[in-house]
Each structure stands twice: as structure tokens, then as C-alpha cells.
Image: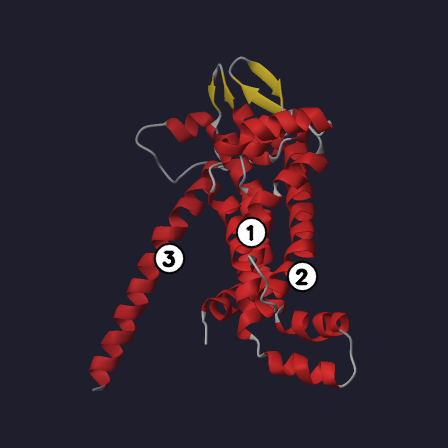
């Protein structure tokens, strides 16, 4: 019996190790590429033995992209800052609008409530190209083209439905009797919402906010069409690495490392809320 248990543990450890290697190897390889020159990366056969350097990171930070045709000015750090700005404010606005709406859909039954909720969710699944043409026309009319406000507004198509439906499911899992008891004690609806409902739903709200931030960070199409270079996020700014003289693989790898770091750090910080929030919000009854 002990031998069987030991074998099962060893097999489980081996399988977990293989899964970790499978998923983490691309990340490790990208990191190693970011420390190499183009010549080292493209040599055949490839080798993990090389002399590491930080030239690729230095090029991104200084804005001087080194190519075979000479130096090319890029604005990667500005694009990275644009991603942080757009994603943070988009998620903040979505939380401000989506959490009260999710609570209303979870606690109150009103005419066409489910239809409205489903319509908001459908915005998340609609192809971006379906709304880009009318959006670009509206933006030109309203003067929102190439503005942070315009991009934050259109990012609500990504963030708001996600937050609304995840947080709604979490509110539905919280017993309304707790809120009723608090209301009977003479407290207003607003105090009940802010002091009881939101604290109990905090893991779900954190999980929804984290997922919305990741989706907003990874968005490409909206910023490509509706903003110029000085307002574009890092996902669009990465196109600068594809030049007429070739593809700068080392700088692309370094850009990936720098652009993934904020979302990875945020995910690691909030992983407890992410697992708890998604698991609770997905279970009914």
C-alpha cells in the first residue's frame, strides 16, 4: 500500500513537472532571446549557450532601435505607459459602473432585466470589426478620435460586460438575508450595498477587475484604428519592431518581457482573489 502511494505521488509530481515545463518553456525561451543579439538568435543550430547582454532593453528604454540600416526612433516606453493608463482607467470606470449594475441585476427583478443584461454581454462577444466603422464615424463627429477619453470609452465594450456578469454571479451567491438583517437595523440601501454587499463580494470584484485589466491590456484593434502613435498602447507599438531591414527578434523579446511584467505581477498579487472569485461566481445554489 505504501509502495502504491509513493508511486502515485511520484507520478503526480512528474506530470506536474511536465505541465510546468510545457507552459513555462516559451516564457523562458523569450526571456533568453531578450538577452541575445539577432545574429545569436538566428544561428543554426540554436544553442542556449551565449553571452547575455542588456542591449535590447537599453534600446527600448532609450527609444533607439538598432537595425542593419541604422538607428530607428521608437516610443516603446510611451506605448507602455499608454497601456497602463488606458487599462487602469478603463477598469476603474467599468468597476464604478458595473458593480452597482451587477448588484441591481442580482437583487432586483424588473421588466426586460435579463434582456438588458444579455445585450450588454453580447457586446463582449461581438467582433471588434463589426463596430469599428460606426465608432470611427462617431468619434470624428464628437472629436474623440486620438484621445485617451475616447479609447477609455470604447474599452468599456471589453471591460464592462465581463465585470457585470462575473460580479453578478457572485452577488447571487451571497444570501440576501444578511442584507435584510442589516436593513432591518435601520440602515439605508446605500449603506447596505457599500458596507455589506461589496465587502462580501470583494474576491469576485477583484477577479473580475483583474480579468478585465488583462483583456484591456491585450486589446489591439480598437487602438490601432482609433488612435495615432502617441496614444497607442504597447500591443500596437510593437509593430515598430518589424522594419524594412528585417525583424528585430531580440528587441521584440525584450518588449514582450517588459509588457508582460505588469500583468504578471498583478496576477501573482491577486491570484488568491482570482481563484476564489471565479470559483464562487461560477457555482450556483
Q: Quadrant of residue 187?
A: bottom right
Of residue 198 and residue 232, the one placed in the foreground of this image is: 198
Return the residue at label 1.
Answer: 161
Of residue 137 and residue 233, the one placed in the foreground of this image is: 137
At which x and y percent is residue 279?
47, 68
First-in-chain label (1 vs 2): 2
Spatial CA span between label 1 and label 2: 13 Å
At which x and y percent is residue 197?
66, 72
Element type at marker 2?
Answer: helix
Element type at marker 3?
Answer: helix
Q: Is residue 253 visible?
A: yes
Residue 93 falls left or right of residue 31? right
Residue at 70%, 25% (x, y): give it: 141
Return the residue at label 3.
Answer: 20
Residue at 26%, 69% (x, y): give it: 11
Of residue 184 and residue 11, the one placed in the foreground of this image is: 184
Q: Are marks 2 and 3 in contact (CB under 8 Å)?
A: no
Return the residue at label 2.
Answer: 100
Spatial CA span between label 2 and label 3: 39 Å
Residue at 33%, 58% (x, y): give it: 19
At which x and y percent is residue 282?
46, 67
Amino acid at each position: 500500500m505504501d509502495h502504491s502511494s509513493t508511486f502515485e505521488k511520484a507520478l503526480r509530481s512528474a506530470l506536474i513537472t511536465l505541465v510546468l515545463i510545457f507552459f513555462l518553456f516559451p516564457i523562458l525561451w523569450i526571456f533568453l532571446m531578450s538577452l541575445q543579439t539577432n545574429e545569436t538568435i538566428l544561428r543554426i543550430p540554436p544553442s542556449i549557450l551565449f553571452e547575455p547582454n542588456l542591449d535590447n532593453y537599453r534600446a527600448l528604454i532609450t527609444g533607439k532601435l538598432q537595425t542593419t540600416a541604422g538607428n530607428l526612433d521608437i516610443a516603446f516606453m510611451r506605448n507602455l505607459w499608454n497601456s497602463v493608463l488606458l487599462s487602469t482607467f478603463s477598469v476603474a470606470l467599468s468597476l464604478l459602473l458595473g458593480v452597482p449594475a451587477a448588484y441591481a441585476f442580482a437583487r432586483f427583478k424588473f421588466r426586460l432585466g435579463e434582456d438588458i443584461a444579455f445585450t450588454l454581454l453580447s457586446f463582449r462577444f461581438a467582433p471588434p470589426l463589426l463596430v469599428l466603422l460606426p465608432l470611427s464615424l462617431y468619434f470624428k463627429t464628437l472629436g474623440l478620435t486620438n484621445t485617451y477619453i475616447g479609447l477609455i470609452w470604447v474599452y468599456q465594450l471589453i471591460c464592462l460586460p465581463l465585470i457585470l456578469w462575473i460580479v453578478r454571479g457572485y452577488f447571487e451567491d451571497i444570501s440576501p438575508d444578511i442584507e435584510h438583517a442589516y436593513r432591518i437595523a435601520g440602515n439605508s440601501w446605500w449603506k447596505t450595498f457599500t458596507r455589506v454587499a461589496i465587502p462580501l463580494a470583494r474576491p469576485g470584484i477583484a477577479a473580475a477587475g483583474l480579468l478585465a485589466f488583462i483583456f484591456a491590456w491585450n486589446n489591439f484593434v480598437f487602438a490601432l484604428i482609433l488612435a495615432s502613435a502617441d496614444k497607442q498602447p504597447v500591443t500596437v507599438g510593437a509593430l515598430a519592431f518589424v522594419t524594412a531591414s528585417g525583424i528585430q527578434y531580440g528587441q521584440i523579446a525584450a518588449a514582450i518581457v517588459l509588457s508582460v511584467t505588469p500583468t504578471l505581477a498583478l496576477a501573482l498579487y491577486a491570484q488568491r482573489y482570482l481563484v476564489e472569485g471565479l470559483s464562487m461566481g461560477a457555482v450556483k445554489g
